[in-house]
Image (cartoon, grey):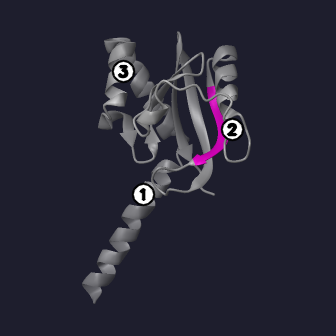
């Protein structure tokens, strides 16, 4: 019985670590910076290929790196390949917010920052609050977001 309790406590601690990791904005920034460093070393096409091939370096639980062009077209997405090549600027989030337009505007005006919206969490399979860190590099926007729960 004592072993079972110890295992249960350990399991809860491990699960809470994953939840806390998703709540840390620094993880999203680090993911974007990792992608930027890779792109500067290997080129945009190499980064796009690695993301689309689901390289685990660019996926950490519900945090993942994706790339969008300044025209709004998704260039790389490791979780939903159906989005690649699509421009969904006119598609709102779950609350009707056109957050993709906000991402493009922020990238063009300031080059980096955060955008809040509601989106489907691939881990929980629920619509949740999400904030995404974006960074413009030439003609592309590198993006990684964190989920903040319902």
* Numbered disc total: 3
Magenta-span inclusion, residue 118: yes
Q: Label 2: which residue?
A: 92
Tell me what residue is drawn at x 68 percent, y 34 percent.
Answer: 99
User: Mark 3 or mark 1: which is in front?
Assistant: 3
Tell me what residue is drawn at x 31 percent, y 31 percent.
Answer: 53
Q: Are marks 1 and 2 in contact (CB under 8 Å)?
A: no
Q: Residue most toward the left?
A: 3
Q: Secondary structure at mark 1?
A: helix
Q: Earlier in the sequence, mark 3 or mark 2?
A: 3
Looking at the picture, how far across and down is residue 109, in whole percent? 70, 15
Q: Is residue 117 left or right of residue 138?
A: right
Q: Label 3: which residue?
A: 47
User: Mark 1 or mark 2: which is in front?
Assistant: 2
**Please, is residue 112 above or below residue 25 in the view?**
above
Q: What numbered label is drawn on residue 17?
A: 1
Q: Residue most toward the right?
A: 96
Alpha-carbon distance for marks 3 and 2? 27 Å
Q: Residues within 10 Å of mark 3 (few under 14, many from 20)?
A: many
Range of the magenta residues? 113-119
Q: What numbered label is drawn on residue 149?
A: none
Q: Nearer the viewer, residue 23 or 43?
A: 43
Tell me what residue is drawn at x 37 percent, y 34 percent.
Answer: 58
Alpha-carbon distance for marks 3 and 1? 28 Å
Q: Earlier in the sequence, mark 3 or mark 1?
A: 1
User: Mark 3 or mark 2: which is in front?
Assistant: 2
Q: Earlier in the sequence, mark 1 or mark 2?
A: 1
Magenta-span inclusion, residue 59: no
Q: Residue most toward the bottom?
A: 1
């Amino acid at each position: 019985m004592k072993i079972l309790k110890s295992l249960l406590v350990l399991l809860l601690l491990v699960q809470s670590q994953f939840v806390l990791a998703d709540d840390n904005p620094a993880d999203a920034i680090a993911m974007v910076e990792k992608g930027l460093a890779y792109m500067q070393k290997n080129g945009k096409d190499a980064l796009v290929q690695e993301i689309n091939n689901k390289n685990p370096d660019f996926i950490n639980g519900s945090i993942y790196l994706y790339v969008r062009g300044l025209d709004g077209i998704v260039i790389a997405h490791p979780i939903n390949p159906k989005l690649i090549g699509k421009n969904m600027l006119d598609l709102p989030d779950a609350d009707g917010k056109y957050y993709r337009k906000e991402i493009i505007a922020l990238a063009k005006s300031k080059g980096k920052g955060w955008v809040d919206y509601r989106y489907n969490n691939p881990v929980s399979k629920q619509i949740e609050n999400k904030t995404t860190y974006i960074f413009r590099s030439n003609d592309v926007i590198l993006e990684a977001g964190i989920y903040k729960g319902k």
